[in-house]
Amino acid sequence: MKNAFLYLFTLLLYSTLIQAQDKPGIDKITFSMFSKTKSKELLPILTDANKLYNKKIYDKAFKLYLKLYDEVDSINALNYRLGVSALMENNSYAAIFYLLKSHSSISRDYYLRLGEAYQLNHQYKNAGEAFHNYNQSLNKCKQRKFSARLKQLQRECQFGAKTVKDSLPYFVTNLGKSVNGYYDEYSPVILHDTNILYYTSRQPPKVNNKPVCRSTTKENIKYATFDVAGTTVSQPLQGIKQRKNTSVAGADHAHNQLFYYKGGERSGSLYALKVDHGKGVRSSIIKGAVNRKTVHETYLCTTARGDAAFVSDKNRYSGGYDIYFSPKTTKRRIKKSRPAGNAINTTFDEKSITFSPDGNTLYFSSNGHLGMGGFDIYKAQRQADGAWSEPINLGYPINTAADELYYYPTGDSLVALMASDRAGGEGGLDLYQVVKDIRIPFDLWGNIIDIENGGVVSGKITVFNAETKQPILSVSNDSLSGKYTAHLEDVGNYWIQAEAKGYLNQVDSIDMPVNRKQQVRKDFHLQRLASPFTVFGTVKNKHNGAPLQAEILLVQSEKDSIVARAYTNSADGSYSVTLDDKLNMTMQVNAINYYGCTDTLMLRDNKTDTFKKDIYLERSKISYTVSGVVRDAKDNSVIPASLSFYQPGEQIAMMVAHTDSISGKYFATLQDKGPFVVEVNAEGYFFTNMALAFPADSTLLIRNVSLQKMSTGSKIVVENILFNTGKATLLPQSFIELNKLARLLDENSDIRIEVSGHSDNMGSAGLNKRLSRNRAESVWNYLRERGIDEARMLFKGYGFDKPIVSNDTAEGRAANRRVEIKVIE
């Protein structure tokens, strides 16, 4: 019987796996199966995995194939499908690993897929070799058909290898789970003089319990409040019906309105929409050169001067989707258009266009111009005669070997938005923020030598921020050559100090460079001390004795000239200054947020070669301090934890404090008395929130925290989960806490939970149990949409069967209306 199951499993695996992506032919499959479990248990998993794979739901297919791989890791066809599934999810590392474990004989497109995986991983040399091998595997007829694509791939590999090395100064960051999710998000737009982000999402309004391909669900428009620090939780755009595919199609900067597309995947119309803070006010169809029945227009944008550009496949000009210009437009009509020409349009696709705020730069995506792979973003400049320049690739890290589309410059000249399906996102196309790095990094170098004999002096240099009095870096020079090197990330107001034993310290300023990666030389010629004399001590807070980071100036009393400049050690507040002689000095001590101190040092008659001077400074700015210990709620042991401090209603933490790993103590200094919301997190524990506010007569608070471990049977009440009255519809105010819960579950991927709904005792038992179950399911669905595997979660409604307090009071009934999370394994 066991052999029969093994035979059936092998036969099914062979018959189903031979039809890979686009049904590539497989010359032969060699099975080498050493199953650790009964083959009967693997058949349902294989069947489900193949169904998901054929439906292009690659992420879920990958997880199931991985279960088979854990049992049998030597089947070429299985490794091939694991590799292709990972590739389609832009997981290049996994794609390369599993494809290399497969064999080229498994599929005609094996080398093509392997090359794409290498290219996605920016291993362009290996990618080029794989593409060459794929071309060699084709017959002459297919080689001729593939020649244009091969040439494009080879150009991408050459360009990509060079571009990755010449990385440009930009930060590209994912907008996070408040906007992005499992489904595709793209086409961001922010109208002038607003902070409302409108974008397209394929997230269904209601969760479909059946797995679906994330790129085939219906499009809908959402909005969120945006600034550089982050975004609020998104909501559906109100005021228009979104029964069909409805997507953001661009911005009309001439009339400050939104363009949107409505219709099917291949046929629909473009509309203009007046919007007001997330609500559509007035909609009208665009007339003229767009919305023809025989063609498909997907994107439209205008400039303040009134000219327009749109993407269309009409006339199949140059092949695929192309860009068209219209020199004059009105509020609802695009007048006669012309193609952008061969400088911009290619035989491949051009998509997602937009203008810069001044209308003189055109940004667009293309998979036909010289790029790194997939769709890249390009820009073209408007010339004096009105023509457009040759497009320029925006480079890495804006572009990668994945798809980058829908580039949208915001009103801030340093910030843009775009969509990309690069690795590390929430799933599919995600929205990203592109911020130009205006820093000017440079390298500082020089020699430390003796001023008298020119010999090498072994010493060190320390660079300080002159404004904050904080040390930035400290490096020693080479004892043989005397040379030191240091890298600074940006220009600034710096002091550099050179010191060596037996020599007079030297402090000087640095000439700042104007170009990135410039070399700046600063040599030091130190004077040997004939009769060294040292002034030392500490600088501390007058009231609590805390060490301070301070600047110390020693000024010669007779000449009123600076003899020495030093900075304290931030850890203990200590300083030490070695002088060449005993002179009467004036000591000036300054620290940020403290009153300065000036004192006279009568050193000339000092009998020893050292002098100790401790300084205590008075704080000039009131600060508020909270401290405490984070412990395990059960055994009272201390826990390494982080505490994030938020202003009420804000989603971006104003500061984050960490506990000491040994004592469990934390210490945080705040600039006002609050109120604040403090989120406490620790690995393997449920998070908790605590309210914090300082009384009028206190600047110091002690707040100890107990956290509950995420062990089997433990549970917490999730606060601030709100629903419409009498319904199971989550209110947007709930999303902040639910996003925290999703993050917690994502970070603790080995636990399973039960989401339970509870009610008070008002109404019938049946109604309350049904409502509590529906509310638990709503939370379950939300977590599922945020990427938590449904197999890890159960949901159940208990009605009023499990109250935590008496239902005799309004407060008690409110406490019993709750959602709980319980760890079940």
Image (cartoon, grey):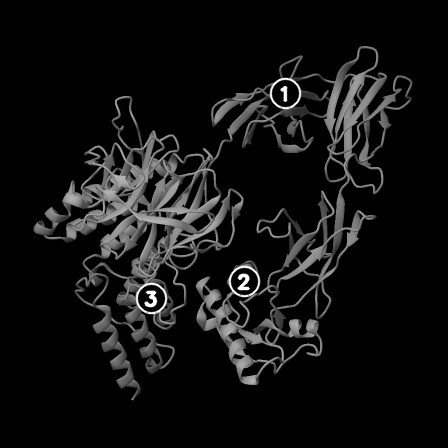
Q: Up-down: is 284 above or below 601?
A: below
Q: Which quadrant holds residue 552?
A: top right
x and y, in percent, of residue 393 in the image: 32, 35
Residue at disc 3, secondary structure: loop
Figure label count: 3
Q: Which residue is drawn at 55% across and 24% down?
A: 445
- Are the residues at dot 1 and dot 2 in contact (C-beta closer than 8 Å)? no
State left or right for residue 621 relative to residue 741. right
Image quadrant where one finds the N terminus: bottom left
Q: Up-down: is 87 above or below 490?
A: below
- Are the residues at dot 3 and dot 1 in contact (C-beta closer than 8 Å)? no
Mark 3 to mark 2 CA distance (whole Å):
23 Å
- Are the residues at dot 3 and dot 2 in contact (C-beta closer than 8 Å)? no
Q: Residue at x 86, y 26 (%)?
A: 611
User: In front here: 228 or 638?
Assistant: 228
Whether residue 372 is visible, yes or no, is no
Upstream in sequence: badge 1 or badge 2: 1
Residue tagged 1: 509
Front: mark 1 or 2:
2
Find residue 738 and name its label.
Answer: 2
Q: What residue type is labelled 3?
A: Val
Mark 3 to mark 1 CA distance (whole Å):
62 Å
Circle 1 crowding by C-alpha within 10 Å: few under 14, some 14–19, many from 20: some
x and y, in percent, of residue 559 in the image: 80, 10
Residue at disc 1, secondary structure: strand
Whether residue 109 is visible, yes or no, is yes
Upstream in sequence: badge 3 or badge 1: 3
User: In front here: 569 or 636?
Assistant: 636
The residue positioned farthest toward the top in the image shown: 559
Residue tagged 3: 212
Image quadrant where one finds the C terminus: bottom right
Upstream in sequence: badge 3 or badge 2: 3
